[in-house]
Image (cartoon, grey):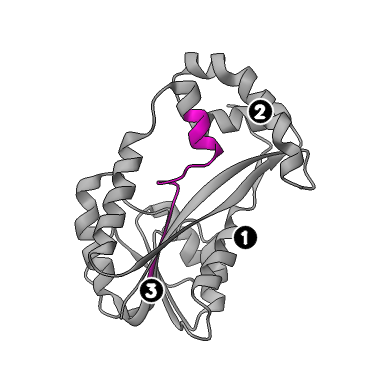
């Protein structure tokens, strides 16, 4: 198995945006649905007065517990016993559109008055990765577009929403490693990847001046945020 010498500033960028949307002096409690491996969760736990993670995967639950992070080992949606100033869903929405209604309904019930539901996803992106996917594979991620529109519909039925976009970066000193890694995120068959890899490599090489970095090569990932505030 090839080991990619590729790194990311994604956790740092996510943290900066989450705190900007929910300043800890105004937002004391946070429920983090799909908290992951704990890298971001540790910083959020230390920032907010009350933090609770919900995580489904055994390996992530163990990592969270090892860092003394309060966590419920469960698949959301579950019944919530408290309300929170912010409910965070960062890259943790279901991959089935049929699950969106119960997911949003339950999450929204847990948002305290004056609080926020913050959804962060790659769905709805119009960044470089999507443009290259459309070019190389010839079809857009229709299911992702549909799920993003469903998310918008469900939240607009409950609140005014704000949609914004920001970027994090994958970076490497190895052009080959970064191009191979990027091909995994773009997708397609192995034959399609083999055909588009030279052009992808050239694209990564050509855009490096646009993204100042201490590393030689970068590949941007666009995140989409949907913010809904409860009156």
First-in-chain label (1 vs 3): 1
Q: Secondary structure at mark 2?
A: helix
**Along the horizontal axis of the image, is 109 left or right of 178?**
left
Q: Residue at x 38, y 54 (%)?
A: 92
Q: Which residue is mark 2?
A: 203
First-in-chain label (3 vs 2): 3
Q: Residue at x 34, y 41 (%)?
A: 145
Q: Is residue 93 shown above or below 170?
A: below
Which of the 4 image quarters holds residue 86?
bottom left
Q: Residue at x 49, y 84 (%)?
A: 49
Residue 184 position in % (x across, y down): 52, 30
Chain part drawn in magenta: 117-133
Which mark, by number, is residue 190? none
> Are circles 1 and 3 on residues that touch, CB within 8 Å?
no
Q: Is residue 119 magenta?
A: yes
First-in-chain label (2 vs 1): 1
Q: Which residue is mark 3?
A: 116
Which of the 4 image quarters holds residue 206?
top right
Residue 166 position in % (x across, y down): 55, 54
Q: Which residue is mark 1?
A: 12
Q: CA distance from mark 1 to mark 3?
A: 21 Å
Q: Is residue 85 magenta?
A: no
């Amino acid at each position: 198995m090839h080991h990619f010498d590729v790194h990311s500033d994604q956790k740092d960028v996510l943290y900066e945006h989450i705190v900007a949307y929910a300043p800890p002096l105004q937002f004391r409690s946070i429920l983090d649905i799909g908290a992951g491996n704990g890298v971001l969760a540790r910083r959020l736990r230390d920032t907010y007065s009350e933090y609770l993670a919900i995580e489904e995967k055994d390996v992530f639950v163990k990592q969270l517990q090892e860092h003394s992070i309060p966590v419920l080992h469960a698949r959301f949606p579950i019944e919530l016993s408290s309300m929170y100033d912010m409910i965070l869903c960062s890259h943790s929405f279901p991959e089935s559109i049929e699950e969106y209604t119960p997911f949003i309904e339950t999450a929204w019930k847990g948002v305290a008055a004056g609080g926020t539901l913050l959804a962060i996803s790659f769905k709805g992106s119009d960044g470089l990765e999507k443009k290259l996917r459309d070019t190389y594979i010839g079809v857009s991620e229709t299911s992702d577009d549909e799920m993003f529109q469903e998310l918008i519909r469900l939240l607009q039925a409950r609140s005014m929403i704000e949609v914004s976009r920001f970027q994090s970066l994958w970076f490497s000193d190895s052009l080959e490693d970064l191009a191979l890694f990027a091909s995994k995120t773009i997708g397609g068959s192995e034959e399609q990847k083999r055909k588009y890899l030279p052009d992808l490599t050239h694209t990564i090489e050509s855009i490096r001046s646009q993204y100042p970095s201490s590393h030689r090569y970068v590949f941007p990932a666009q995140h989409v945020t949907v913010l809904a505030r409860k009156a």
